[in-house]
Image: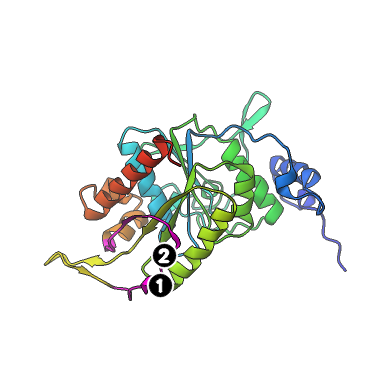
């Protein structure tokens, strides 16, 4: 058997991240002691409300939903942070026009006293942070699981968020280690799930729903993205995807449908063109749908119901 070096000794790792991984390695719970038995103190939340946007599978438009929900909240006068926590495929930088073309190994952090602090980016009225700001546009994330956990902790805890009203976290799809680590390290105000009108999206969405319920995370509701195409001539909604049978839909599991975002090329064109929908097409039906959903979320959270 080949003995692999521990993550903190891997070549080319930035020193701050290696030190963080080593510290977490020392603090990992033993098999005899489950995570819920630990008594470590939870650090203060980085925002008044921390809302995760998740999905059971990729390709449902989760990043588009996260970005435009954040913009809708900011449009209503709230201070909003947006964390792109999809470390394997960070797409927010492309959607706001802030990508690096060259590959980079520069993980240097600004220093504030003895504490290292990551400075976020201001764009379209949002405070944004993404692992994509630290990588070239086509550069893969090749860190192992322990180092990824250390990086995610840094992005949540050591970014100069400025204590916003809302922090929207664009999660990776699925229910794997990154999501579980985030739930251990951060108390969420709630989670919003994203599905598309496809059987497989609802099936995987139900798995994600069960995952968050078992972790006692408040479920704020779900959004159906790409929900019908509005005909530009007659205004009728046309189903591009086959309807999900009621018995197999996520709505049968007691989750509220916060709204539906109609399918339209404008949505993807806006994201690919570095001008999000609410900026490029603020009067579109899709933009209005995002605003309506944002108002529902704000009312739920600020009323203390979640």
Q: Residue at x 68, y 26 (%)?
A: 114
Decide which of tag 2 and tag 1 comes sooner along the chain: 1
Looking at the image, which is closer to me, 219 or 124? 219
The number of discs equals 2
Where does residue 306 sit, x and y in percent of width and height? 46, 42
Q: Residue at x 65, y 23 (%)?
A: 113
Quadrant the N terminus occupies: bottom right
Numbered badge on residue 9: none
Where does residue 121 sit, x and y in percent of width and height? 46, 38
Can you tell which quarter of the image residue 245 is in?
bottom left
Where does residue 158 sit, x and y in percent of width and height? 60, 35
Where does residue 65 sit, x and y in percent of width and height? 38, 53
What SS does tag 2 mark? helix
In screen coordinates, is 155 left or right of 205?
Answer: right
- Name the residue carrying label 2: 252
Find the magenta span and give its range. Answer: 240-265
Q: Is residue 209 shown in magenta?
A: no
- Name the residue carrying label 1: 247
Q: Is residue 242 shown in magenta?
A: yes
Do the residues under discs 2 and 1 have CB atoms within 8 angstroms?
Answer: yes
The chosen color scheme is: rainbow
């Amino acid at each position: 058997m080949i003995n692999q070096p521990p993550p903190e000794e891997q070549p080319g790792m930035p020193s701050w991240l290696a030190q963080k991984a080593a510290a977490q390695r020392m603090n990992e719970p033993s098999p005899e002691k489950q995570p819920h038995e630990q008594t470590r103190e939870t650090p203060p939340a980085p925002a008044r409300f921390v809302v995760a946007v998740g999905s059971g599978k990729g390709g449902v438009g989760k990043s588009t939903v996260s970005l435009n929900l954040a913009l809708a909240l900011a449009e209503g006068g709230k201070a909003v942070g947006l964390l792109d926590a999809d470390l394997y495929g960070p797409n927010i930088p492309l959607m706001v026009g802030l990508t690096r073309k060259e590959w980079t190994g520069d993980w240097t952090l600004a220093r504030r006293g003895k504490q290292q602090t990551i400075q976020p980016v201001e764009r379209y009225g949002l405070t944004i942070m993404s692992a994509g700001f630290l990588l070239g546009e086509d550069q893969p994330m090749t860190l192992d699981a322990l180092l990824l956990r250390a990086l995610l902790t840094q992005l949540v805890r050591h970014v100069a968020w400025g204590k916003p009203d809302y922090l929207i976290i664009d999660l990776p799809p699925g229910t794997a280690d990154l999501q579980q680590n985030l739930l251990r390290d951060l108390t969420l105000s709630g989670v919003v799930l994203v599905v598309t009108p496809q059987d497989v999206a609802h099936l995987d969405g139900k798995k994600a729903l069960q995952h968050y319920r078992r972790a006692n995370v408040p479920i704020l509701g779900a959004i159906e993205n790409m929900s019908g195409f509005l005909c530009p001539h007659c205004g009728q909604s046309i189903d591009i995807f086959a309807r999900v049978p009621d018995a197999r839909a996520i709505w049968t599991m007691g989750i509220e449908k916060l709204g539906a975002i109609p399918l339209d090329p404008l949505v993807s064109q806006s994201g690919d063109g570095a001008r999000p929908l609410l900026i490029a097409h603020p009067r579109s039906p899709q933009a209005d749908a995002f605003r309506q959903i944002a108002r529902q979320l704000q009312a739920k959270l600020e009323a203390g119901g979640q």
